[in-house]
Image (cartoon, grey):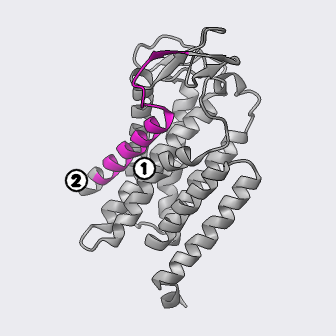
């Protein structure tokens, strides 16, 4: 039975069927848009086909926990989320920004000669960063006090790019820890130091996300309410470009976040 499951075609079909079921269920629950569901199927299929159940399980830990937190106390987070370009339903851009680097690390295991342990560290580091950043955003949005700017330390309105809270920072650490511990429990590694590696990689990636968001992310200024927002339209009116690189939207920032997590994870394993 085990040898049968190792057949490439069987693993490909298993990944396609399993990821399709998860994507369809998430689409029905409005956690994913149609494009997001298609992207999730690609990510899941590649992960199962190239890595196996332990790798796919880690993706599910990230996705399920993040989707649950997105729905948790959504009304209380509405004020902060009004500044975001996208809502709680993840589209293809968001799925690939959070899972694309991890999927690439998994796919690289198919190339002979590459160290699978190093690639798994990159895979887990990328997911650790994505989880840390998502948890920081979702739980940090429940903070009773306004966030402070990661570079200046000054208080900023909730939802401001580059704003962090103590609650959100603790959530980022918890999210990275979850991915690190899950990598052991799911059988992806037997290295007892691996959760610490993922913790460092994940929290570092989330910190870089906040810095890039504060400096280079493209932001707009709402002429009605005066807030700095991610979308070109706010309060049912066009918003004016305010700062940042035009191509550096939130998906690009998240992609860099996971890339940093992957690089640090691989570097720590090599060292």
Queried whether the magenta region covers residue 256, the answer comes back as yes
Q: Specify whether 203 is left or right of 45.
A: left
Q: Specify whether 45 is left or right of 205.
A: right
Residue in the picture at 51% in, 31% down:
169
Q: Position of residue 84 (x, y in %)?
A: 60, 28
> Is most of the magenta stretch helix, strand or loop?
helix
Instruction: From the viewer's side, name the closer residue of 92 and 21.
Output: 92
Q: Position of residue 222 (x, y in %)?
A: 60, 13
Instruction: From the viewer's side, name the closer residue of 269 and 114.
Output: 114
Tag 1–tag 2 contact (CB < 8 Å): no
Label 1: element kind: helix
**From what the image shows, is residue 209 above or below residue 90?**
above
Circle 1 or circle 2, nearest the eye = 1
- Say the numbered circle drawn on residue 271: 2
Residue 125 seen anywhere in this rendered image of the structure: yes
Tag 2 or tag 1, which sits nearer the N-term? 1
Q: Quadrant of the N terminus?
A: bottom right
Residue 186 seen anywhere in this rendered image of the structure: no
Residue in the picture at 41% in, 63% down:
106
Label 2: element kind: loop
Queried whether the magenta region covers residue 212, the answer comes back as no
Measure how far apart labels 1 and 2 are at the Cα level.
Answer: 18 Å
Q: Position of residue 144 (x, y in %)?
A: 67, 20
**From what the image shows, is residue 244 above or below residue 68?**
above
| Label 1, residues with CA under 10 Å away: few <14, some 14-19, many ≥20 | many
Which range of residues does the magenta coloring cover? 240-266
Instruction: From the viewer's side, name the closer residue of 125 and 244.
Output: 244
Residue placed under numbered mark 1 in the picture = 126
């Amino acid at each position: 039975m085990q040898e049968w499951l190792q057949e490439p075609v069987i693993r490909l079909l298993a990944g396609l069927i399993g990821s399709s079921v998860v994507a369809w269920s998430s689409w029905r629950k409005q956690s994913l848009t149609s494009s997001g569901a298609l992207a999730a199927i690609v990510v899941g299929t590649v992960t199962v086909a190239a890595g196996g159940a332990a790798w796919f399980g880690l993706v599910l830990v990230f996705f399920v926990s993040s989707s649950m937190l997105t729905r948790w106390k959504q009304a209380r987070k509405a004020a902060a989320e009004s500044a975001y370009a996208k809502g709680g339903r993840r589209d293809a851009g968001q799925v690939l920004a959070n899972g694309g680097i991890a999927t690439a690390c998994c796919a690289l295991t198919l190339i002979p000669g590459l160290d699978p342990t190093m690639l798994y560290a990159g895979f887990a580091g990328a997911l650790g960063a994505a989880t840390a950043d998502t948890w920081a955003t979702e739980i940090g949005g429940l903070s009773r006090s306004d966030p402070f700017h990661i570079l200046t330390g000054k208080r900023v309105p909730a939802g401001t790019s580059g704003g962090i809270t103590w609650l959100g920072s603790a959530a980022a650490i918890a999210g990275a820890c979850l991915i690190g511990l899950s990598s052991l429990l799911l059988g992806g590694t037997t290295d007892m130091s691996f959760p610490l590696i993922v913790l460092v990689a994940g929290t570092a990636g989330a910190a870089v996300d906040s810095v890039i968001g504060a400096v280079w992310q493209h932001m707009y200024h709402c002429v009605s309410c005066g807030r700095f927002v991610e979308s070109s339209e706010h309060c049912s009116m066009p918003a004016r470009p305010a700062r940042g690189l035009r191509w550096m939207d939130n998906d690009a920032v998240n992609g860099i976040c996971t890339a940093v997590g992957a690089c640090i994870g691989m570097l720590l394993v090599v060292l």
